[in-house]
Amino acid sequence: DIFIFSVYTGLRFEDAQCLTIENLNNYKEKPFIRFIQQKTNRAIEIPLLRPANEIINKYKNSDERKVLNKILPKISNQKVNMYLKVIADLCGINRKISHHIARHTFATTICLNNNMPIEDVSKLLGHSSIKTTQIYGRITEQRLINSIENINLKISK
């Protein structure tokens, strides 16, 4: 759940682990999180996609949340990465998988492949430079196909 949460929010492991109930907000009845990034010490706001919000709600009655006030279960990055390795082995994935891949997946698959402007992706990731975001967001074949399809729709009118 922590990995998938970061796939849908782009959060670094440490930022996801530090989120508390106080970081949850609503804007025009839409859920988002507001927090200070651990790495950059900058304030950031991220509107929540439905899968991320569902993960938050999954733990709303957990004993851990009642005691620690955290929105996600507490676990070490090393343990998460160990579990991801086991899952990859069971699935026959011959690639090193770590929690950090979730952040790249958010940038590329969730945002850029769905035509989000790179400037918006950069803001969501908390980058101060588009150049840093470009490292995260690869241009995939799907993104190129989507772009061409959008142009085809516009020129065929």
Image (tube, helix red, strand yellow):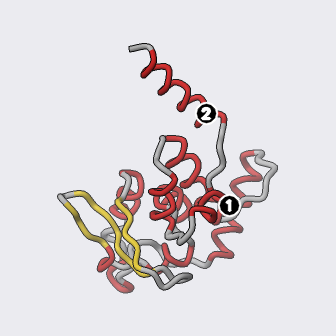
Residue 144: x percent and y percent? 61, 33
Pick the front one: 155 or 29: 155
Instruction: Please give the residue where the numbered disc 1 appears in the rendered image.
Output: 84
Question: Which SS class for mark 1?
Answer: helix
Q: Amino acid at mark 2?
A: Leu
Viewer-proximal residue among 62 and 115: 115
Residue mark closest to the camera, 2 vs 1: 2
Q: Residue at x 55, y 26 (%)?
A: 148
The answer to whether 52 appears left or right of 84 in the picture is left
Based on the displayed image, in which of its 4 quarters is residue 76 positioned? Answer: bottom right
Q: Residue at x 32, y 64 (%)?
A: 32
Residue pushed farthest left? Answer: 28
What is the x, y in percent for residue 26?
Answer: 23, 65
Residue at the (40%, 79%) spot, across then down: 43
Residue nearer the viewer, 55 or 117: 117
Q: Nearer the viewer, residue 130 or 7?
A: 130
Instruction: Give the crowd class for mark 2: few <14, some 14-19, many >=20 residues within 10 Å.
Output: few
Residue receiving disc 2: 144
Please tell me how crowded label 1 is: few (under 14), some (14-19), or many (20+) other residues with Cα within 10 Å: some
Residue 30 visible here:
yes
